Image (cartoon, rainbow, N blue to C red):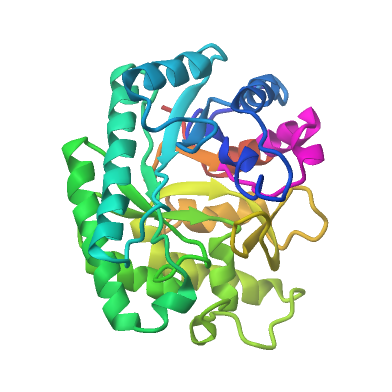
Amino acid sequence: MDTKNNFPKLYNATWPGIVGKGEGSEPVIPFDDLLAYTAAAEVNGVKFDGVDIGLLEPHVDINGGKDEVRRLADKVSAHGLKIGSLVAPIWAGSAMGSKESRAVFVDMVRKACEFGQQLREMGIRPFGVVRIDSSSSPADWAKDPAGNTKVIAETFREACDVAADYGEKLAAEGEICWGGMHSWRTMLNTLEAVDRPNMGFQADMSHTFLYLLGYNQPEDRILPADFEWSDRQALEEGLQTLTKALRPWTIDFHVAQNDGTVFGSGSHDKTGRHCLPNDPNGKLNIAHDAGYWLRGEDGQLTKAFKHICWDGCMFPNEVLHKQETWNDILAALISVREAHGWSA
């Protein structure tokens, strides 16, 4: 397939095989299976360029040292793929917890950044960030909004300083299930309080979309309470308001679809329901609406990151084990690049 754009590169996510799985839910999908589906996906000659990886067991042992880094690099490169952004497994601690809990949080960031640096040095990871969240709930945060935001910011600053030692940037995930990050305004307040050059925002077209509706923070909703999904103009105006506030912070971007509802499975709290790109209940025009994140107020491309990643979690295993699913996902990513990509 001839296309004028070869950037941003198109990456798949591996954590959909873990998030919402196990603990009474469906079994975890093996890392090798996800790599095979990703490598086999093809749409008119275009293939995935790489994968973003959650440094999560059982896929990855973050304590495995250089041997584990090499094992992971060899597995991915054997499929002709690169590695992009990494998810730090910080949930054994909390960014607004006790001194000991916060120390665990920062140490896991350190381990993720060291992992990422080694992957870069091996040449398998040309770009990407380390993703974090607050590892705390909106309900706990709401007990002391100002105080808890201050503590989260202090923890994030410490984590940023650690990340800088490894040449890494941290991206805070815009997802309604994380305290201090659960609305567009709380997210913005947290980012501004951190005030570090290597701190940014990870926008997800599904998770971040729910900021419009004010889940977990009704006073911060952007769309009116009587909003009707048929009102596309109001939806686009809401997206413009949202992206104007958070786009300047955005250093990582997930393409996704959402049906306007929340969902959780396994041990994962309710958050934006990821839909397949061709879901008839999807509320987003993926290719068009990605432009609100990828283009500035002047309509020009920001080129703030060199790859985009599909993120679709908590789908049934039956869906994730179909090659057709990954082909459809790749097609959605291609549509975004054709509309908002560039050649380099």
In the image, residue 98 lies in the stretch drawn in magenta: no
- Specify whether 128 is left or right of 194: right
Q: For this rendering, which residue is in front, 295 or 55?
A: 55
Q: Quadrant of residue 192?
A: bottom left
Q: For this rendering, which residue is in front, 334 or 151?
A: 151
Residue 278 picture location, percent across and down: 78, 48
In this rendering, is residue 101 above or below 4? below
Residue 299 picture location, percent across and down: 46, 56
- Specify whether 226 is left or right of 84: right
In this rendering, is residue 115 above or below 171? above
Q: How many marks?
A: 0
Q: For this rendering, which residue is in front, 159 or 102?
A: 102
Residue 227 picture location, percent across and down: 69, 83
Which residue corresponds to the image point at 27% horizontal and 50% vertical from the top-left?
Answer: 106
Task: State which region is magenta.
Answer: 310-331
Which residue corresponds to the image point at 70% horizontal and 36% vertical from the top-left?
Answer: 331
The quarter of the rendered structure image containing the N terminus is top right
The quarter of the rendered structure image containing the C terminus is top left
Q: Quadrant of residue 262?
A: bottom right
Kindly tell me whether residue 192 is visible in this rendering. no
In this rendering, is residue 182 above or below 250? below
- Specify whether 148 is left or right of 328: left
Q: For this rendering, which residue is in front, 99 or 2?
A: 99
Which residue corresponds to the image point at 50% horizontal and 28% vertical from the top-left?
Answer: 6
Residue 147 picture location, percent across and down: 27, 80
In this rendering, is residue 125 above or below 311? above
In the image, residue 319 lies in the stretch drawn in magenta: yes
Kindly tell me whether residue 29 is visible in this rendering. yes
Q: Quadrant of residue 325?
A: top right
